[in-house]
Amino acid sequence: MIIQKSTSPRISSFDPENFSFGDTFIDHMFICEYDNEKWGEPRIVPYGPIGFSPAMMGVNYGQACFEGMKAYKDENDDVFLFRPEKNAKRINKSASRLAMPEVPEEIFMKGLQTLIDLDRDWIPKGEGMSLYIRPVIFATEEVLKARISNKYMFAIVATPAKSYYSAPVSVKISDHYSRAANGGVGSAKAAGNYAASFYPTKLANDEGFDQVIWTDDTAHEYFEESGTMNVFVRINDTIYTPKTSEKILDGVTRDSFLKLADKKGIKVIVGDVKVKDVVEAFDNGTLKEVWGVGTAVVTSVFKALGYQDRLLNLPILSETESFALSLKKDLTDIQTNKAEDTFGWRMKVEKNILEEA
Amino acid sequence: MIIQKSTSPRISSFDPENFSFGDTFIDHMFICEYDNEKWGEPRIVPYGPIGFSPAMMGVNYGQACFEGMKAYKDENDDVFLFRPEKNAKRINKSASRLAMPEVPEEIFMKGLQTLIDLDRDWIPKGEGMSLYIRPVIFATEEVLKARISNKYMFAIVATPAKSYYSAPVSVKISDHYSRAANGGVGSAKAAGNYAASFYPTKLANDEGFDQVIWTDDTAHEYFEESGTMNVFVRINDTIYTPKTSEKILDGVTRDSFLKLADKKGIKVIVGDVKVKDVVEAFDNGTLKEVWGVGTAVVTSVFKALGYQDRLLNLPILSETESFALSLKKDLTDIQTNKAEDTFGWRMKVEKNILEEA
């Protein structure tokens, strides 16, 4: 691995009490380029621009997929990743569906760990704080032909993060727009899936909703995802969530919630979640909670569901009553090394990886 | 408009008899940037790289759409665009669906004409030759948040072109993968649509097919598009093509073929094209032709359709018998100023636009 350290690091001017999420970048980034049917020498370089012309295929034909993951700092300033091997596997699943080359897991994991170790001072500490990490693969060949690119870049960039979304949100159950086609790319973290969701989300925002619950594109009868998250429904004391499929992302937080719920002895049914059943449960008073789960916000609690002309106002549950909030606490306690990690989910980022390398 | 002419133009080393399509770029490109809710000063600059970090939203979230169009040089070296106002309108339709700002038609048309005029020497002349032009809008803000970008670039780049695809091709009628969801972005020239199609196309290639005929994602009962083209079917002497919808691109070549067919007195039915009806027509000998139409290749004639386990070999028609080929000739004769333009489709690119500006 080639390391080019920043000669003008910005870390001394970083205020962990006061920063802007998403556009404050750590001093370095990891990059590795693919050409001639193989990945080249991995590099860590100062974060910053790389030259691409507007003919870049990643931009023209959307061959691009990414991951979202976090690093957490505990009380002793030790740094932990959370199930990073899941992200390494999933980015390759996404890449395959988009006819892009897979990134060897060793390049992914070593690049990730070396970068996070090098810029560990950027990780803010305390309640809800973390480093949000974005691995991304995109086509870099500059050719105006709608075909598979021959050149790619795998990059990892990162930004300090506070947990966003604090207040419960209102979500609209989609009855026209959809996120994924049968035989499409819904299960991939494909760049194009996000762009496609922005306009319907904006329309929902204009109606007073914060997000959209995506339903099947055929008849809008089944829950699929919510915003950029997997969706959970609690009826009485049973949790329901759609099974993963070619339309539904296999979320790391989703999987972790399922395992934590099981450990707690909460009954979980993974399968079709019918809009009709959710509305019926609301009407007969058995619908207790609906929430989204994802890396960025861990849990987004829903206060209301918009369904056709109705607004279904959900009960407000305390942290002890709420499965969403108690599972969130279980998860974040493991992530931040406040609780025992019986699942083996944490991965400590060793210090001075560079010097050993 | 700011013009920065290339100080090291490559045109003197361009051989119009021997060049590579798609990655040979003309000396200049047009760019215009959007920020603070407005488009800035349009610029023509030397073709080349622009600095973007891997956090660029166009790459991460796929907010990117494009157009494909051509300029043709006639015997007198006059240069013509073909229905460019259709592309100006459509790129904005695509942009809107992806929650991106529209480009004012004046910026689009003036940028296009000035660029093509400036680099008119790059347009190769003769049978099938043209300049392929790629207007593209993409999100340029560098933020790791899955939301609508606040910054964009509108660019026009171009490459000399020969008509590609000469031989008739075999296409597979899709029975699993799909291109577009109901309530999705199929009617937009969204970057992500192309990436999503590459893997299914590769699988079809592995089975010996050149392209895929996309069918509806619900039950694969209806033709939608073929490859990156609109699809036409001829049964006896009637042409059938799917009507445009939120899943089907409103192609300029498609629209031109419909108008030319009408002028020729050919009966055209625009509506549902059922896979079952096409297969039945093959079986009873009334299926004469199936072909794709699009800007890049104008017409791609199909020699065989793969349907489930069957291979339907289509008749080989002469240029006079074939509707596909005779309509193609009608169209290219208008595009290249060999025939009278009764529709008012050609737009001449005036000389020395720069000096007048």
Image (tube, coloured by chain):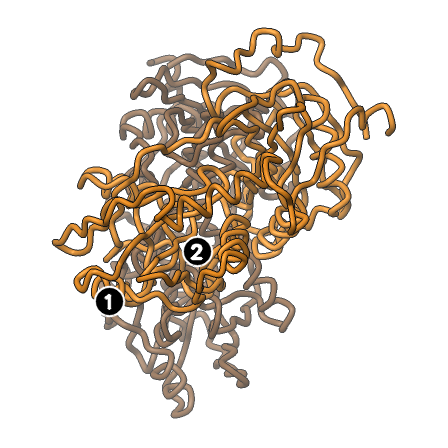
Chain colours: A brown, B orange
Q: Residue A307 appears at what percent x and percent y?
A: 49, 80
Q: Name which residue lies at 59% across and 24% down.
A: A49
Label 1 residue SS: helix
Foreground tag (2 vs 1): 1
Q: Is mark 2 on a helix, strand or loop?
A: strand
Q: Residue at x 55, y 63 (%)?
A: A200
Picture coordinates of residue A293, whole percent (x, y): 41, 59
Q: In this image, B248 relative to A224: left or right?
A: right
Give the position of the N terminus of chain B as an image quadrant.
Answer: top right
Q: What residue type is labelled 1?
A: Lys
* Image vertical order of residue B113 relative to residue B209, above or below: above
Residue closer to the observer: B67 or A123: B67
Q: Quadrant of the C terminus of chain B?
A: top right
Q: Distance between the residues labelled 2 and 1?
A: 47 Å
Residues marked 2 and 1, same chain: no
Kindly identify the residue that appears in the image at 24 percent across and 71 percent down. Answer: A269
* Residue in the picture at 43% in, 45% down: B326
Chain of the residue under the numbered disc 2 shown in the image: A
Looking at the picture, which amino acid does disc 2 mark?
Answer: Val
- Give the vertical position of A8 relative to A198 (above or below): above
Dividing the picture into quadrants, the one containing residue B166 is top left
- In this rendered view, identify the residue nearer to me: B300 or B149: B300
Name the residue nearer the viewer: A277 or B112: B112
Mark 2 Cα within 10 Å, few/some/many (few <14, many 20+)?
many
How far across and how far down the image is residue B186, in percent?
46, 56
Provide the residue designation for mark 1.
B276
Mark identifier at residue A172: none
Q: Residue furthest left?
A: B309
The residue under label 2 is A298
Q: Which chain carries label 1?
A: B
